[in-house]
Image (spheres, rainbow, N blue to C red):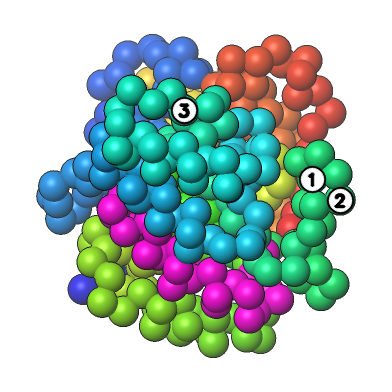
Amino acid sequence: MPIGALQSFGAFRASAFNHLSVAGSPTVQQSIAQLYDIYSSYDPLGLPAKQPLQGPALYREMTDFVDNVGNRFVRVQSDAWSILDKPLARKQYVRKALDDNTVLGQQAQRATRSYLHVYPMGTTNPSGNSIAYAPGRTTANNWRIGINVKPDDIALAARRLLPVADRFNNINHIKFSAPALATKPDSVIVYLRQAADYAVIRGEVVQALQGLSLQGSFSPMWNEITAGLAEAAEPPRRGGSFGTYRCLVTHLAWQYANVLAGRVPPRTDFYEVLGYLFDSFGVPQLSPQSQRQVGGAAGWAELQKLFFQASALYDGRSLQDYSGYSLMNR
């Protein structure tokens, strides 16, 4: 049975309370990082961990991935979002699979353990590493479909899913975790604009993956459609990732609850404050996979200020770096 977002939210907040109530006095950075560890390690089914590919299997999978991408542009996130030189990378992966003494170029090496962003047909490259979408293609995605694809099926997932992205202008692009990565459930993410054709897109994504053996679990607060395939909203711009946004708000809720109680708060009080702050930051308590517009909550200016203060500390940045920042609706 797929696990709904409300059920997994309940598990997350319980684990968060259990940890924070005995954690002592961690720094802000430590507190949010620990909450993110709770978020990212959620595994209600106790499944064996996915195993990253290495050696010849890794380079064969990368070769297949490049082949399955075809003429589409790929940007390598960990290589400063550079556009992958696919012919050169493919040649190096083929050689590396045959002879481990082959030295990969920097970009090809980084691509094996990066997020690889693949753009639909019709995308162009005006200059440098920039891309430009075809007319009519959405540039304002606010929703995502995540898929827990195993590392040895990343290339096959690309072959199945990219034609779907080509057909629907409300799909912005698809992100694939390279097969040397295996730490996150959302190893493939379809970024899109939720509109009238969303049910059709979701159905085609599910259909495209028929027969693929997905890892049957997902992160909390995503809403599972089928085991290992889930949907969720994009957080506000400048809010970080889906999980980070919710973990940071959870940290703020714990701080608020401590101040109100003058001590470690009772579980029920923490849950009440957490629900209030989720609502304030646009995350509905009863559908925590969703995102409402932000900016209308009571005391919003102060809440937003606290959010970016915590965000700066979590990122290891100066508070001044986030001065004047605002969460922006999508």
Q: Residue 130 got which mark?
A: 1
Q: Which SS class for mark 2?
A: loop
Among the two numbered marks 1 and 3 on one chain, the one whose residue lies closer to the N terminus: 3
**Relative to 301, is 217 above or below?**
below
Residue shown at 33% from the left, 48% from the top? 60
Q: CA distance from mark 1 to mark 3?
A: 24 Å
Callout 2 touching callout 1 (CB < 8 Å):
yes
Where does residue 218 sit, x and y in percent of width and height? 32, 56
Label 2 CA crowd tier, 10 Å (few <14, some 14–19, many 20+): few
Q: Residue 264 got which mark?
A: none
Label 1 CA crowd tier, 10 Å (few <14, some 14–19, many 20+): few
Q: Which residue is mark 2?
A: 126
Tell which tag, 2 or 3, sits nearer the viewer. Answer: 3
Q: Quadrant of the C terminus?
A: bottom right
Residue shown at 49% from the left, 54% from the top? 66
Q: Count of labels shown?
A: 3
Compare residues 42 and 49 and report the one nearer the observer: 49
Q: Is residue 162 visible?
A: yes
Q: CA distance from mark 2 to mark 1?
A: 6 Å
Q: Identify the amino acid type marked 3.
A: Leu
**Relative to 49, is 294 above or below?**
below
Where does residue 327 sit, x and y in percent of width and height? 74, 43
**Relative to 184, is 304 above or below?**
above
Q: Which residue is mark 3?
A: 104
Range of residues picked out in magenta: 145-173
Where does residue 132 sit, x and y in percent of width and height? 81, 57
